Amino acid sequence: MSYVGVLIFILVVTASLEVLFRTRVYRRWRRLLIAIVPCVAVFALWDAYAIAQGHWTFDVDRILGVYVFGSVPLDELLFFLTIPIASVLTLEAVRSARGWTVGDEAGDAAPVSGRGDDL
Amino acid sequence: MTYTQLAIAGVLFAALIDLLVLRTNLLRRRVFWASYAIIVPFQLLTNGVFTGLRIVRYDGAAIVGSSTPIDSPPPFFGDGRIAYAPVEDLMFGFALVLLSLSLWVWAGRRGIDREPRSGPPVGAMASLLRTPPDGRETTSR
């Protein structure tokens, strides 16, 4: 199993939510990009620091062998892209199933009290 | 800084974004914790594969537990590890999940791709999920 193999597995499994729960996340790609890009930036910085400090290392036989910012494996960047996609798909699937308030509802972002949607 | 310190800082940073900067307040919402409860087992599985197969190896100086051994998997549980992965990975993952969801909700609140909304689930899925006590779900079918 390679690093990217794990990521492809996650993307394939979570893509089923698009069908089963009609999450409609991929067609909202602009919004998805806004969620992803800052995550990739922040976590790539963290990664670069951690690699420089020797916090973790990678098995070179199971990563792509392409590096960004000198030291960060491309696989890691793809991880910081895959996890937000999987997370958003999960959130939208839960919303689809339960109808709970998420906070992006049109007109009013304030919590709806008395419905048990908020803790 | 160690991975332990950075992982704690990462969680606090994501919480700060959610509660004070973007004010998406996901940490106070049922939908977030239900989603995270679904994500956690998969997160443990993913971290476990990366760490158990030693695709990623950790330095004991940076984490609560010991270094990943050269020629064998780390402990499955104990010595600062859960499902092979350092406990720090759980915090790292939590910060990534919370930050991405906070940004997603924030963008939607600003009207960027708020539509099309998600749901309802397809018929087969919907019949697996029973209608909650207040019956809200029934209106969509």
Image (cartoon, helix red, strand yellow):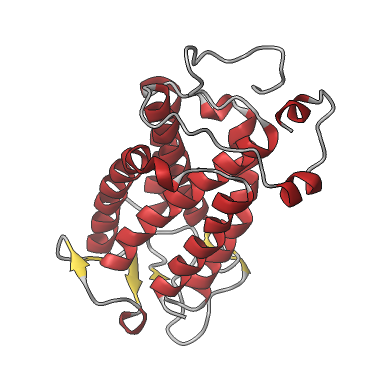
- x, y (%) of residue A110? 52, 13
For this rendering, which residue is in front, A29 or A10?
A29
Residue at the left extreme of this rendering = A70
Residue A16: give x, y in percent of width and height: 58, 57
Q: Is residue B93 visible?
A: yes
Residue B80 in view (yes/no)? no
The residue lying toward the viewer, choosing from B55 and A92, is: A92
Quadrant position of residue A42: top left
Count of residue discs:
0
Please give the name of the residue rendered at 29% of the width and 58% of the height, measured from the top-left corner: A50
Relative height, residue A30 to residue A114 (above, below): below
Residue A45 rendering spot, x and y as whole percentages: 24, 50
- Residue projecting furthest to the front: B141
The correct choice, above or below, for B52 with respect to B122 in the image is below
Is B132 placed left or right of B75 in the picture? Answer: right
- Name the residue at 57% across, 15% down: A111
Q: Which residue occupies the foreground of this view, B106 or B130?
A: B130
**In what quadrant of the picture does the C terminus of chain B appear?**
top right
Residue A56 image position (x, y, % from top left): 35, 66
Q: Is residue A80 left or right of residue B52?
A: left
**For the view shown, which residue lies furthest in the bottom direction?**
B71
Relative to residue A97, is residue A48 drawn left or right? left
Q: Residue furthest right?
A: B133
